[in-house]
Amino acid sequence: MNTRHQIDTALFNCAFQSLPPLFCEQTPACGLILGSGWSDALDPEEVLARLSYSEIPGLGAGSVIGHSGELLLCTISGCRIVAFCGRRHWYEGAGWTPVALPVELLRRLGCQNLLITNAAGGINPTFTPGAVMAIRDHLNFTGLSPLIGPVIPGWGTRFPDQTTLYSQHLRHHLATAANSINLHLNEGVYVYAAGPTFETPAEIRAYAALGADAVGMSTVPEAMIANAAGLAVAAISCITNMAAGVSASALTHNEVIEEMERVKPRLSALIKTFINQL
Ligand code: HPA
């Protein structure tokens, strides 16, 4: 087996030891893993500690524009939050260790709630750019899984159940939070494509036929690990563009970043009010 498919647990230990002691003083109310453009939507009241990803063994600086690569210990709505601003992806070619590491660090910190965010392409024709979708379920179309390999201590059983991977009670909190700020929150199915190419129109038609509402290149691996490890998981997609062939225009990462910039204030308010509910 290609060793990149396996997780280097020795790096987990090194990464955990690299965290300043302040991180371990109190259990965070929630962990955040923020995808493309979402880091700018984070508006903490107080930053208690910050660390560049390059200072965390096994995580390393990412290569994707819009992913700032900083770990924050901060307060939002009066709650202690650990926020991974920017994520690593399988398509970057560094294997699963950097993708899995944020979840493992949150687990070791005793964190029980995880909010994962991403930018996604809209497949559901009722969506328009700027729409926000809570993930109700996913389709993993990559054939990849970060759970392939030896069972990792703390990550549950060999065959984790995924029937209610996206926590019903956190989804309820998201809906209540969105309601209180007059944000229309869609719920739907997210399809995970490995990337780094955007999809073809034929792929998008197939995903639509299978019930997908949005498509992206992330989130599912972290959600699978967190669920297996017993964390409650919520995930939100911000629709930055209509998926290939749904609209006639060509897709670019710049468009994704520009749309995220436009909807930032709404996303920021959603994160705050969601955390306030916990
Ligand atoms: N496809 C995959 N990932 C994405 C897209 C898309 O259309 N938009 C933002 N991330």
Image: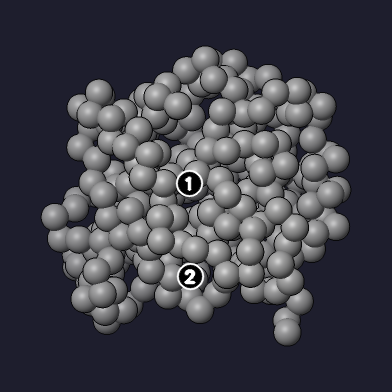
The local crowd at label 2, few if under 14, some if 14 to 19, many if 20 or more residues have their Cα within 10 Å, is some
Residue 57 in view: no
Camera-nearest label, 1 or 2 = 1
Q: Secondary structure at mark 2?
A: loop
The local crowd at label 1, few if under 14, some if 14 to 19, many if 20 or more residues have their Cα within 10 Å, is many
- The three-letter code of the residue at mark 2 reads Gly
Task: Please tell me which residue is depicted at 79% across the width and 63% down the height of the picture.
Answer: 8
Per the rendering, the mark at residue 195 is 2
Q: Secondary structure at mark 1?
A: strand
Task: Please tell me which residue is depicted at 38% across the width and 68% down the height of the picture.
Answer: 139
Label 2 CB sits under 8 Å from any ligand 1 atom: yes
What is the x, y in percent for residue 172? 32, 37
What is the x, y in percent for residue 89? 58, 60
The residue that disc 1 covers is 233
- The three-letter code of the residue at mark 1 reads Val
Residue 13 in view: yes
The front one of 229 and 8 is: 229
Which quadrant of the figure contains the C terminus? top left
The front one of 75 and 85 is: 75
State the colouring used for the structure image. Answer: one colour
